[in-house]
Image (cartoon, rainbow, N blue to C red):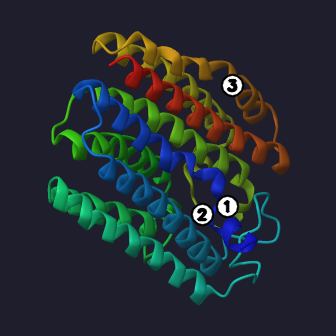
Amino acid sequence: MRIWLNAARPRTLPAAIAPVLVGTAAAVFVADKLPSWSLFVAALVASILIQIGTNLANDYSDARRGADSADRLGPVRVTSAGLITPQRVLTATWIAFGLAALLGIYIASQSDWIILAVGAVSIAAGFLYTGGPKPYGYAGLGEIFVFVFFGLVAVNGSYFIQLEELAWLPFGLSVAVGLLSTAILVVNNVRDIDSDRRADKNTLAVRIGREKTRRLYVFLMLGAFFVLGLTIVLNDGPWLALLGLAGIPMARGPIATVTGRTDGPSLNQALAATGAVLGSTSVLTAIGLVLGG
């Protein structure tokens, strides 16, 4: 079970949980109640399953392409380390995606069938990140994927399934969440920049270099809080939602680490800390939206 837990990469799961909490909380603020608990739970579990499926697909595909070499600074990948056979990892990938698809069918039946198309595209994007003939994660497009699907799509989708409409408040919040989620990937890629370059995995970090990637990380972290505050003010959101800005002090540690360290253990800690910033900021923002409604 510890091996499978490692394969699921729990440090990345805040990126799956945060957007559903924020999008649903925005719906609660607008409607003054939670329209459907079952849709909230289904969306939350589906988002987690898509994240896990993406992580497993990444583990499987990177091992096949030789990107997870012995000199990699990140946590052990179960496929390349021989802890789980490639076929079992691939099977687990499709089980996670399949369960997410079943939940998507339920969500669509209770809201709008367009959710099925959104879910299908999300699953395909998760697999093709490092899988398929031309993985876009190897072409420097991973950050765009994370921003779009774990920010814009997940937050606005969670809002939409509750109220079947879109609005500027959840859109602005989705930008803030997307920026912090993208920062998690940026830490991962700046840590692995040397091994990725040797494996011809041309992530954005490999393409633009370590220093520019570090500056990008700072921009994402600070930009997220700026957008969060601006969104609440411009859309007459509840002032309590500005509780999310309490995550700013937490961002100082990982920013200092990412901009000043290159060793794997320190950057692994920064990765976990960035996930904690995303999680705490999202939870506090969600609480503020719910209580301020």
Disc 2, SS: loop
Residue 245 sits above or below residue 94 on the image: above
Q: CA distance from mark 1 to mark 2?
A: 5 Å
Q: Please tell me which residue is depicted at 32% across the width and 53% down the height of the picture.
A: 38
Q: Residues within 10 Å of mark 3 (few under 14, many from 20)?
A: some
Badge 3 vs badge 1, beta-carbon distance below 8 Å: no
Q: Position of residue 130 (x, y in %)?
A: 51, 68
Q: Residues within 10 Å of mark 1 (few under 14, many from 20)?
A: many
Disc 3 secondary structure class: helix
Quarter of the image with the C terminus in it: top left
Q: Which residue does the image show at 65% across and 77% down from the upper left?
A: 63
Q: Position of residue 73 (x, y in %)?
A: 79, 58
Residue type pointed to by label 2: Lys
Q: Which mark is residue 201?
A: 2
Q: Earlier in the sequence, mark 3 or mark 1?
A: 1
The image's mark for residue 196 is 1
- Camera-nearest label, 3 or 1: 3
